[in-house]
Image (spheres, rainbow, N blue to C red):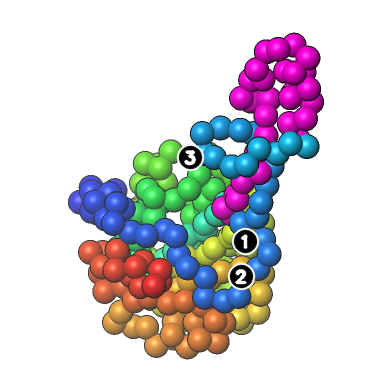
């Protein structure tokens, strides 16, 4: 494991923005809604119907109800799930893979609990499953152990990413693809995008032609990555 890259990823993690904006029309699953929630210090309006029994008992006994016996109606923001997909094929070896690994490691440092990390060439390696519990340090170690080799099956990677996010109960599910998007094996990747709610592509700045074509074809947001230090700027571009 490259300790310098690990240290860089941790420094950059505090500067990246995970809350990437939608590029398409919002789907129902990704919209916050009014919900009945247990009363706490986050606020909300008292839900009389849901709290009626506790209020009646309090009135009869003359003892104020406990906070956890009451309910409120509040606007609940959608929970977000994230899948980081790293291209580790031969075309993404060397500096490109290092930059992608730093981006994925930095995102993992900032990601919510509900996230997965995949690495792919002609096969897909699940570094962290969506519903798997792993220490961030272990995930980052495995990301930095990646070495580039083999052909590129982008369709397979997107299919596995969709399957990983399918395990999540989150309302909003996003894939961040770190790749030059140049498939050399497998079926057409465009066919797999329909199963993904939101796709964001981060491509090497010195070789982005195929990624730009792919992103336009599927309506994905895109950012260019010139090197490890450019990770915050790339994520900020996606968030604009």
- The answer to whether mark 1 and mark 2 are in CB contact below 8 A is yes
Q: How far across and how far down the image is residue 71, in percent?
A: 67, 34
Give the vertical position of 114 relative to 194 (above or below).
above
Could you classify mark 1 by the number of other residues whose Cα lies within 10 Å: few (under 14), some (14-19), or many (20 or more)? Answer: few
Could you classify mark 3 by the number of other residues whose Cα lies within 10 Å: few (under 14), some (14-19), or many (20 or more)? Answer: few
Could you classify mark 2 by the number of other residues whose Cα lies within 10 Å: few (under 14), some (14-19), or many (20 or more)? Answer: few
Q: CA distance from mark 3 to mark 2?
A: 31 Å
Q: How far across and how far down the image is residue 211, in percent?
A: 44, 82
Question: Which-is-in-front pick, marks 3 and 2?
Answer: 2
Is residue 195 at least partly visible in the picture? yes
Is residue 2 at least partly visible in the picture? no
- The answer to whether mark 3 and mark 1 are in CB contact below 8 A is no
Per the rendering, the mark at residue 181 is: none
**Residue 224 part of the magenta-drawn span:** no
Q: How far across and how far down the image is residue 145, in percent?
A: 35, 52
Q: How far across and how far down the image is residue 23, in percent?
A: 52, 75
Q: Secondary structure at mark 2?
A: loop
Question: Which-is-in-front pick, marks 3 and 1?
Answer: 1
Give the vertical position of 205 relative to 81 (above or below).
below
The magenta span reads: 50-78
Residue annotated with mark 2: 26
* Residue at 34% across, 83% down: 207
Per the rendering, the mark at residue 31 is: 1
**Residue 71 part of the magenta-drawn span:** yes
Q: Secondary structure at mark 3?
A: loop
Q: Earlier in the sequence, mark 3 or mark 1?
A: 1
Per the rendering, the mark at residue 134 is: 3
Q: CA distance from mark 3 to mark 1?
A: 29 Å
Q: Point out the image quarter for the C terminus.
A: bottom left
């Amino acid at each position: 494991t490259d300790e310098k890259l690990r240290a860089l990823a941790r420094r950059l993690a505090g500067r990246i923005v995970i809350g990437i904006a939608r590029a398409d029309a919002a789907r129902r699953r990704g919209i916050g809604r009014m919900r009945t929630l247990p009363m706490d210090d986050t606020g909300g309006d008292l839900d009389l119907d849901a709290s009626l029994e506790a209020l009646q008992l309090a009135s009869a006994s003359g003892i104020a109800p406990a906070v956890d016996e009451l309910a409120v109606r509040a606007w609940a923001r959608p929970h977000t799930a994230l899948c980081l997909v790293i291209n580790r094929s031969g075309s993404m070896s060397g500096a490109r893979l290092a930059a992608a690994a730093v981006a994925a490691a930095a995102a993992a440092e900032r990601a919510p609990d509900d996230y997965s990390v995949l690495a792919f060439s002609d096969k897909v390696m699940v570094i962290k499953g969506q519903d798997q519990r792993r220490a961030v340090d272990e995930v980052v170690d495995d990301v930095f152990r990646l070495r580039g080799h083999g052909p590129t099956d982008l369709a397979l990677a997107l299919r596995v990413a969709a399957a990983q996010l399918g395990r999540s109960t989150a309302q909003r599910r996003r894939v961040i693809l770190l790749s030059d998007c140049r498939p050399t094996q497998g079926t057409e990747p465009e066919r797999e995008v329909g199963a993904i709610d939101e796709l964001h592509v981060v491509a090497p700045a010195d070789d982005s032609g195929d990624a730009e074509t792919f992103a336009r074809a599927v309506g994905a947001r895109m950012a260019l990555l010139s090197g490890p230090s450019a990770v915050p700027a790339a994520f900020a571009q996606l968030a604009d």
